[in-house]
Image (cartoon, grey):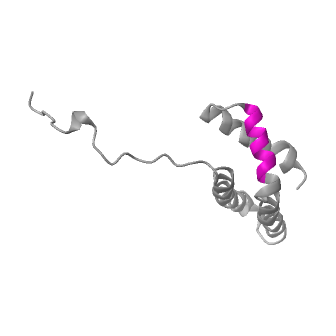
Amino acid sequence: FINAPIIWLPPAYIAQALVYRYPKRKAIRKYVSDVKENGLLTKYWSVWLPASLINFCFVPPHFRILFVASISFFWMIVLSVVANNDQEVESCPLEPEPSMLNPRALD
């Protein structure tokens, strides 16, 4: 509940910046924007608070890791959608490359 906005979510945005090679400062601005405008923390709390309650109250101890891993898988999908919702999608060219117009397989 408290760790997410400080410890877990900012490094995820910084890791994305490192992978896609854009400045870390831009990643932090994106994180702050997602928290304020896209409701990132609200989504985080709406997933993890009930999941934690269910996990500790109803899930047998030997299934808790499996339960949290399953919830984490779906949380990563939500996080990916929120973190990438404003990126423009590059269009795929409709015309074939010139080298593919006259392929010579036997040459």
Residue 48 in the image, given as x and y percentages of width and height: 79, 61
Quarter location, residue 79: bottom right
Q: Is residue 4 magenta?
A: no
Q: Is residue 19 left or right of residue 100?
A: right
Q: Main secondary structure of the magenta part?
A: helix
Residue 49 in the image, given as x and y percentages of width and height: 83, 64
Which image quarter is the N terminus in? bottom right
Q: Residue furthest bottom?
A: 58
Which residue corresponds to the image point at 69% horizontal and 58% vertical from the top-left? 75
Q: Residue furthest right?
A: 2
Which residue corresponds to the image point at 65% horizontal and 60% vertical from the top-left? 74
Residue nearest the viewer, comparing 20 with 52: 20
Q: Residue furthest left?
A: 106
Q: Which residues are magenta?
A: 24-34
How many numbered discs?
0
**Does the image show residue 3?**
yes
Which residue corresponds to the image point at 77% horizontal and 46% vertical from the top-left? 31
Q: Is residue 5 above or below residue 45?
A: above
